Image (cartoon, rainbow, N blue to C red):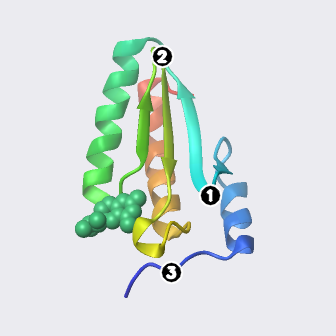
Amino acid sequence: MPTQPLSQKEIEDRLRELPGWSVDSDRLTRGYRLADHFAATAFVVHIAQIQQELDHHSDLTLGYNSVTLAVNTHSAGGALTEKDFELAERVDAVAPGHGAN
Ligand SMILES: C[C@H](O)[C@H](O)[C@H]1CNC2=NC(N)=NC(=O)C2=N1
């Protein structure tokens, strides 16, 4: 069964559980700061590993000491789905280990 779009209320409820994340241009988005460029790059590689595991991929932007994710579900016509929030939770779970905040 394809992943279903979440309702506006479901999105608002899920966002309350994910401080730092917001919806921007219909994509679930968060930026992180890291100590330096190497730390940011290592974090990107870890995110890529999680995304392969989930088979769900954000647009990732690597800056000097920053990483930004933006994700929606292409197969749901660009809507936000449970898969986007699952990715956000998984990334948040490993962020402290990278000193990302
Ligand atoms: C075939 C493969 O499972 C699909 O293309 C996956 C890959 N990663 C994906 N990532 C995102 N963000 N949305 C999708 O619909 C999606 N689909």
Residue type (three-letter) at the residue carrying disc 2: Asn
In the rendering, at what x and y percent does residue 16 appear?
73, 56
**Badge 2 element:** loop
Q: Earlier in the sequence, mark 2 or mark 3?
A: 3
Instruction: List x then y, in percent, for residue 90.
Output: 44, 51
Looking at the picture, does residue 1 appear above or below residue 72? below
Residue that carries the numbered disc 2 in the rendered image: 65
Q: Earlier in the sequence, mark 3 or mark 1?
A: 3
Quadrant (top left, top right, bottom left, bottom right) of the C terminus: top right
* Ligand 1 falls in quadrant: bottom left
Kindly state the secondary structure of the residue where label 3 is placed.
loop
Q: Nearer the viewer, residue 18 or 77?
A: 77
Which kind of residue does numbered mark 3 sit on? Gln
> Cβ–Cβ below 8 Å for labels 3 and 1?
no
Numbered label attached to residue 4: 3
- The residue lying at 56 percent from left, 76 percent from top is 5
Would residue 5 be found to the left or right of residue 44 on screen?
Answer: right
Say which amino acid is labelled 1. Answer: Asp
Ligand 1 neighbours mark 3 (CB distance < 8 Å): no
Q: Nearer the viewer, residue 79 or 66?
A: 79
Location of residue 40 by image quarter:
top left
Q: Could one spot residue 93 in this view of the protein?
A: yes
Task: Say whether marks 1 and 2 touch (CB < 8 Å).
Answer: no
Query: Is disc 3 surrounded by few (<14), some (14 to 19) or many (20+) residues within 10 Å?
Result: some
Q: CA distance from mark 3 to mark 1?
A: 15 Å
Cα distance in 3D space between marks 2 and 3:
35 Å
Residue corresponding to mark 1: 26
* Picture quadrant of residue 79: bottom right
Residue 55 seen in this snapshot: no
> How far from the left and from the top, in percent, is residue 46?
31, 37
Q: Determine whether the residue tagged by mark 1 lies in a helix, strand or loop.
A: loop
